[in-house]
Image (cartoon, rainbow, N blue to C red):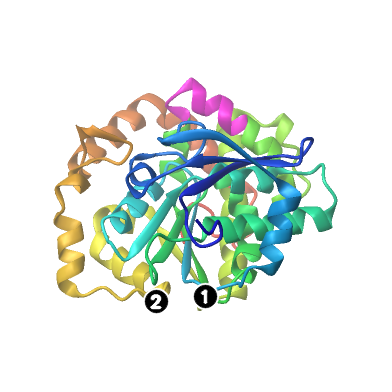
Amino acid sequence: MNLFSSPELYPLQINFERRTVRFLRMTAATYRDSLFLDERARHVEGGIDIKLDDLLLASESAPALSKPTLYILNTAFCGSTLLARYFELLPSCFVLKEPRLLAQLASERSIPDECWKQCFDLCIRLLTRTYTQGQTIIIKPLESCNILGRRLLDSDSCSSITFLGSPLRHFLLAVLKSSDRRDWICRRAQTVCDEASDCRLLCAIDPGNLSVPHAAAYVWLVDRFLCKQLAAENGDRVLPLNAEVLMQAPRQALENTSRLCGLPLSFEQIEWLVAHPSMRMHSKDASRPYDTTSRDVEVKELERCWGTEADQGVEWASAHDDGTLDAQHWP
């Protein structure tokens, strides 16, 4: 097996102390059945360690092939898994959902820049292998990877980004509804300071002093800033996409996204995707029916329970935007 041509061995994470990379043995079916490509991935064999230095050396000598790759950057809680699952139905696509290694590198601050770049290049090479020649690669990273947008585009001229986000109020309600998500948004707010450093409206904010709805609004505004910045610099390779379009007008969202990554879909293909029975189930719980009607009912209940707190987040975002971030709207 050629490690740089087949995705049979999936790179889970790097141990920088031991300088090893841990792999899981996967199949096309286990990739598809894994909602998260971390320790929860449905592998057929795990615990395969390969020396990092051997991989870096082998990567230098292996021919680099340019492959069309679409990255679905996202704000979280916006339907990014749903978008990935649409493409997962197509044999012409190979989909990876939330690869841990990419998220690890996005948060890595302890290694020298040159070493980081070598590991990032290796990561991209390993994540852009396919089982079938000519497949388009779809990677849905964790939201912590949004900061890597420029680097992802620079890694290959055939790469593109769909930056999916919910309107601010929907994002706030999705965060406020559970204690786990409230804890998560406070941690996330602490880690996006670097991402906000280039934004004059947000760079001076101390996320440690923010309430939960304010922290959620802050994180959303940072992602909004990154999205606008990427789109302004790489307009023909970046598509900002509103989650409401994906939910309410999936045909339009699929047409625009597939055209962006060089995968034009026919009218019949798009109709087949939208009508597929799996699309009437929850994207992360295939046993739970879920459609636009279910979602509307859920949103009304969230408004009833947490609408007042959501108001606080909306007001905070408006107070910290001079119009350039277009607070509350996406894109």
Residue 130, how many percent across, how many down?
43, 61
The type of residue carrying mark 1 is: Cys
Residue 127, how many percent across, how many down?
53, 55
Residue at image mark 2: 262
The answer to whether the residues at label 1 and label 2 have Cβ atoms under 8 Å apart is: yes
Q: Crowding at label 1, few (<14), some or many (≥20) Cα neighbours within 10 Å? A: some
Residue at image mark 1: 158
Q: Is residue 277 above or below residue 150?
A: above
Membership of 180 in magenta stretch: yes
Horizontal side of 39 relative to 15 (left or right) equals: left
Residue 4, how many percent across, how many down?
56, 60
Residue name at image x 32 percent, y 64 percent: 253
Horizontal side of 43 relative to 146 (left or right) equals: left
How far apart marks 1 and 2 lie (CA) works out to: 9 Å
Membership of 91 in magenta stretch: no
Q: Which mark is residue 296?
A: none
Q: Find the residue positioned furthest to the top.
A: 179
Residue name at image x 35 percent, y 54 percent: 83
Q: Is residue 253 above or below residue 220?
A: below
Horizontal side of 174 relative to 312 (left or right) equals: left
Q: Main secondary structure of the magenta part?
A: helix
The type of residue carrying mark 2 is: Gly
Residue bounds of the magenta highlight:
176-186
